[in-house]
Amino acid sequence: MSAEVPHRPSQSLESRLLRRLLSHLGNPPIEIVLNWTGERLAPQGRSPIGCLRIADRRTLLSIMGDPQVRIGDAYSAGRVNIDGDLVLLMRSLYGSTSARDGSRSIWRHLTPWHRRPRRNTLVGSRSNIHRHYDIGNDFYALWLGETMIYTCAYYPSEESTLDQAQTAKMDHICRKLRIRAGESVIDAGCGWGGLALHMASRYGARVRAFSISREQIDYARQRARVQGLDGRVEFIEDDYRNISGKHDAFVSVGMLEHVGVENYAVFGHVVRRLLTAEGRGLIHSIGRNHPEPTHPWIEQRIFPGAYLPSLAEMMHVFETTGLSVLDVENIRLHYARTLRHWIERYEAAADRVRAMFDETFVRMWRLYLAGSAAAFEVGQLQLFHVLFTTRENNNIPFNRQYMYAADVL
């Protein structure tokens, strides 16, 4: 008598296809629910940490055709919903894909061949920056804190507030650069002016600060007038390629991501041309452990034209331009903490963001902030500080003690 074969419930074609996709992604510990069939796809051999609910067949087929972009779009539109901690869920997804051999080639395979990042020409850069930074100073003021700084903070302790950490970041940069009273400094990609104003008010520098975001420049000029610093800080709406003169120091915080790797040599030659023989510089940039394209959903929906370089790629700025690297620091965990603080503030202001834009915008930026926090927490993204000087300069510190001296003025 033959053994009875146990009954196995049949699965729909959609669930079988989705199971294959999950296998390619490393079987992350996420449960998926197909709302129109009621099917639940539990992670294999693991307890789920969250649940992803897909609204209908059309949404699923769209995701299967282009998962990197369409799942973000579906979440933004409310056709995909997530139960559980969004950052934790994103961490598990990143961790599962990076743990598999060849995960980078898998993502490339899932990306349409015709997709190309936007170029950072003189015209293209202005358009790219306008799409991200000129969506309203009032929006950013809801969650960036009093400093209005949209880059990684630097936490002296785990108890530091966001504003304390942003101030500490500015001091950390100024100490590395050994900014002194009366020195001339270029701030390329100055944002809303926080660092430029800090260098002038706390360190006595004379600063020329550049951005191609009109809203940022207008805001920064107003801050300078209110603080009585408009005689020491000049905010200029122009591209870094048009900066002129000779200066004691150069700093760029959060701008290299928008330069484009194809322009790094040009960027380096501009910096060298601007520095005096004993000039110093610092570039603060999000980066990666290895070259990889910008996530297409981020490039298309959030940061057009953005590229996050590996450390080797960053060296193209220096290697052919007469500049010497002095120090490299990676503070990615500080960016993870910064993003956690931003997310907390963003969620507290979600109703006001919704009134400014709509529910789709609220969800889109929630996903962007959560995904960024997760990427830094699992080490998919890095935050590099690269300190440099001119090749011939010997007037440099003998060790790092100067960065931590009590008297920095």
Image (tube, rainbow, N blue to C red):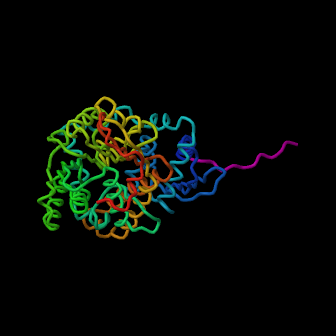
Quadrant for the N terminus in the image: top right
Tell me the chief SS of the magenta region: loop
Query: What is the tally of numbered marks visible in this picture?
Result: 0
Picture layout, residue 63 above or below residue 82: above
- In the rendered image, the residue lying farthest to the left is 231
- In the rendered image, the residue lying farthest to the top is 320
Q: 130 or 322, which lies in front?
A: 322
**Does residue 313 appear to the left or right of 277 in the view shown?**
right
**Does residue 187 appear to the left or right of 21 in the view shown?**
left
Quadrant for the C terminus in the image: bottom left
Q: Can you give x and y, in whole percent of width and height, for residue 311 in the image?
A: 41, 39
Could you tell me if residue 135 is visible in this image? Answer: no
| Residue range (magenta) | 1-13
**Does residue 225 appear to the left or right of 261 in the view shown?**
left
- In the rendered image, the residue lying farthest to the right is 1
**Does residue 325 appear to the left or right of 248 in the view shown?**
right
Q: Can you give x and y, in whole percent of width and height, for residue 188 in the image?
A: 23, 47
Q: 337 or 388, which lies in front?
A: 388
Quick check: is 302 in the magenta stretch? Answer: no
Q: Can you give x and y, in whole percent of width and height, for residue 156 in the image?
A: 43, 63
Could you tell me if residue 340 is visible in this image? Answer: yes
Please identify the quarter of the rendering in which residue 300 is found: top left
Please identify the quarter of the rendering in which residue 392 is found: top left
Q: Can you give x and y, in whole percent of width and height, for residue 350 in the image?
A: 34, 67
Residue located at (35% from left, 58% from top) = 169
Q: 96 or 190, which lies in front?
A: 190
